[in-house]
Amino acid sequence: MYALKNSLRKIFALVTAALVLSACASPAIVQNMIVNPEVVKTNSASPHFEEAIAIAQVKRNTKTNTNPILNSKIDEAAFQRALSASLKNNGLHAEDESSTKFDLFVYIESFKQPLFGRDYKVTSNIRYKVMEKKTDIIWYEDLISASHITPYSKNGLPVGGMRLANEGAIRENIKKFLISLSKKKIPENYAGTKTQAESEPLSAIQKLHDLQKALDEGLIKNEKYILERDKILNSL
């Protein structure tokens, strides 16, 4: 009798392990990873990024994801579709290439999943970088960590739980990114360039004023005035 019970325990353990591995290998559903505006709530899109972002690249860091079972869950194509739909839903995705102002680069750094346990907790660590196409100035760059827990199923079997946790971890990560991006201000180096550009017309006006004053006071001749005036105007 003892031998029979022991055999049954082993069989149950093997079945449970097989179900866990099956859940790990189950592909994620893109629709379950998309972030809608009502989830982001009061954090509206930054006006700088409205309909101006295109996904340039999504890459996975293979050095930090060495387990082939876990790697099967990190599907770059599915993640990119979910991210693209989330950007579009929240008014950030560029409609076409001509309206693209910013390129978005994504690096999936790590994706941690438990093989055993009473609950499924999956943590996604993803780096996002938003770069302006014309200037190559980085407007946003951050490594975002987000987790999602799917409780153990009521019948005691882990069917589907890992997949839901995977999808939740991705969805929460994209959500954090969108909220963080909505609060992003103009980069300091970009603001500095803009201030300098804005100051050039004022500087030119001052030069023209000084030049006119020098002409009026007889300090320079009319020919010199015209030559210097044209130089200032052509520099604008």
Image: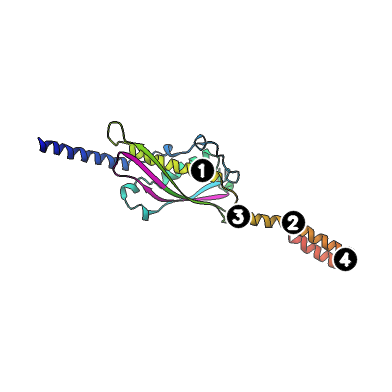
Residue shown at the point (81%, 60%) measured from the top left: 208
Q: CA distance from mark 4 to mark 3?
A: 43 Å
CB of mark 4 within 8 Å of CB of mark 3?
A: no
- The disc, 3 or 2, on the residue closer to the chain's N-terminal end is 3
Q: Nearer the viewer, residue 166 or 188?
A: 188
Q: Is residue 117 magenta?
A: yes
Q: Residues within 10 Å of mark 4 (few under 14, many from 20)?
A: few
Instruction: Say above or below: 23 vs 224.
Output: above
- Give the magenta part as a residue range: 101-124
- The disc, 3 or 1, on the residue closer to the chain's N-terminal end is 1
- Determine if residue 130 is in view: no
The quarter of the picture where the N terminus appears is top left
Q: CA distance from mark 2 to mark 1?
A: 37 Å
Q: CA distance from mark 3 to mark 2?
A: 21 Å
The quarter of the picture where the C terminus appears is bottom right
**Where's residue 41, x and y in %?**
53, 36
Tag 2 residue: 201
**Where's residue 124, x and y in %?**
40, 46
Q: Which mark is residue 178?
A: 1
Q: Amino acid at mark 2?
A: Pro
Tag 4 residue: 222
Tag 3 residue: 188
Instruction: Describe residue 217's horizontal placement relative to residue 162 as left or right.
Output: right
Q: How many marks?
A: 4
Residue shown at the point (32%, 44%) measured from the top left: 114
Q: CA distance from mark 2 to mark 4?
A: 23 Å
Instruction: Describe residue 33's horizontal placement relative to residue 53 as left or right.
Output: left
Q: Amino acid at mark 3?
A: Glu
Q: Nearer the viewer, residue 106 or 177?
A: 177
